[in-house]
Amino acid sequence: MSEHRIAMVGTPCEIMAASKLQYYTDSPIDVKLGLFCMENFSYKYFVNLLKEYDLKMDDIEKFQIEKGFVFLHLKTKETVKIPLSVAKRIIRKNCNICVELTSESSDISIGSIGSEDGWSTLIIRTEKGEEIVNGAIEQKYIEAKDFTDSQLGLLNKIAQTKISKNLETIERREFLARPVLYQREKSDDSIDKEFSEASFQDLRSNVIDVGACVLCGACEYACPHNLITIDDTKPRMKGECPEDCHACFAVCPRTFIPEDLRNDNSKPIGDFKKVLTVKSLKHTQGQDGSIVTTLIDYLLSNEIVTEALIVDKQDHLAWKPYAKLTNAIDEVVKSGGTKYSVCPVFKPLRDLKEDQVKNIDEGAK
Ligand SMILES: Cc1cc2nc3c(=O)[nH]c(=O)nc-3n(C[C@H](O)[C@H](O)[C@H](O)COP(=O)(O)OP(=O)(O)OC[C@H]3O[C@@H](n4cnc5c(N)ncnc54)[C@H](O)[C@@H]3O)c2cc1C
Ligand code: SF4
Ligand code: SF4
Ligand code: SF4
């Protein structure tokens, strides 16, 4: 067992990668705080889009996506809005085949849909998640109100819209190209068999080259031979894979999903215990109710986790995300706010990994 107990924040695809890492490896990730996510953008294309509005990333204080627009709240206190119909062209290709809005394999999911301004919507999914939220309420880190039926109706409706729209895209893509593996419903036995025959070449042809890679970095982290590196565009492999290794293919969130982790597309927000609308009583500088920041503060302050895996923005490249492992609450507070582009979230775990990735050579438990 790892001496690290890490709380991680991520989008639904990243949380699925974390769930597969927990399933197939001795992962140090202990608590999964999943974000809602409708889409994400390419950083490079976002920079170019802003140029059309005579803006730079550095001019922006906060991004917000709401009611069909990307709102750019500028440091000058002005607001510029870009219709999502225009921003559509900078959405990452993999996001168009993503049929999950609310991080269904997390312990706790957090987003804004359904809640008032300054509040967050929080979905408790597991016993661990329930214990954390109850503790944070008891210790007055957060306040909570029940989510009404009409709020839940709205959340379900928006989640269903994403699922239906992107299932259609999947159907169109599969007609022209390869199957979208993570949507294939196979038994665990046949998944194990697929994994036992797969290597990085299969990851390349089924995920990376067909625009399905979410750039999470789970493959890079899990490679026992450190053959994979990820740049801003895709994972690359250098060297020769031993015949009996299949780790990268097994942990990728865009290959087959084992039965226990697979989402049921007929349940728009997945299985859950309770939905609440919540607000921080400790922090204010976050994206919505500052709930992610506050839950991590609670988890670190109570030593429930040893570190948090978060996504901050770079100092020298405005709004460019990078992943960071920290136990310092001021760094967690600084990383608040949503960065609308991707980075390989598992990168900081590579340093811890030597003793973590156990026998995944067979590709399955
Ligand atoms: C790409 C993206 C799309 C989203 N789309 C929606 C949506 O359609 N509907 C909705 O209701 N909510 C969406 N969210 C979630 C929403 O923007 C807030 O992150 C969420 O409500 C939590 O707010 P908060 O105030 O509690 O978080 P904060 O306290 O501000 O903390 C935010 C945390 O998010 C992490 N983070 C920031 N950017 C990223 C990133 N790119 N990747 C991984 N982690 C990151 C940081 O580590 C930080 O700890 C999206 C988030 C992302 C990253
Ligand atoms: S694939 Fe795109 S839309 Fe789906 S969860 Fe990941 S970033 Fe969000
Ligand atoms: S050694 Fe294993 S994990 Fe690494 S690239 Fe090859 S198949 Fe993938
Ligand atoms: S190929 Fe690697 S980086 Fe891309 S989605 Fe799969 S695990 Fe993540």
Image (cartoon, rainbow, N blue to C red):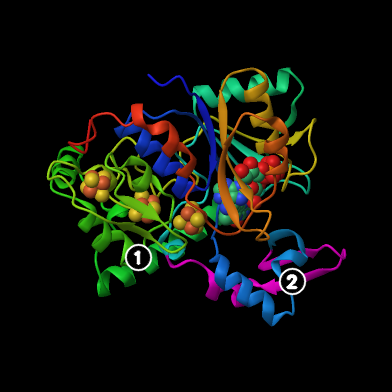
Identify which residue is drawn at 74% across, 64% down.
Answer: 58
Cα distance between the residues tagged 1 and 2: 30 Å
Identify which residue is drawn at 53% across, 46% down.
Answer: 102
The residue that label 2 is drawn on is: 81
Q: Is residue 275 magenta?
A: no
Identify which residue is drawn at 44% across, 49% down.
Answer: 13
> Nearer the observer, disc 1 or disc 2?
2
The residue type indicated by label 2 comes to: Lys
Q: Is residue 248 visible?
A: yes
Q: Quadrant of residue 356?
A: top left
- What range is drawn magenta here? 67-93
Total count of labels: 2
Q: Is residue 36 visible?
A: no
Where residue 269 appears, as percent x and y from the top left, is 50, 45
Quadrant that contains the C terminus: top left
Compared to residue 93, the image places residue 5 above or below, namely above
Considering depth in this image, is 225 or 134 the residue closer to the camera? 225
Q: Quadrant of residue 286?
A: top right
Could you tell me which secondary element the residue under label 2 belongs to?
A: strand
Sort mark 1 into few (<14), some (14-19) or many (20+) by Cα contacts within 10 Å: many
Q: Is residue 6 left or right of residue 75?
A: left
The residue that label 1 is drawn on is: 170
The residue type indicated by label 1 comes to: Ile
Outermost residue, right side: 77
Sort mark 2 into few (<14), some (14-19) or many (20+) by Cα contacts within 10 Å: some
Q: Is residue 58 left or right of residue 270?
A: right
For marks 1 and 2, the one nearer the N-term is 2
Q: Quadrant of residue 213?
A: bottom left
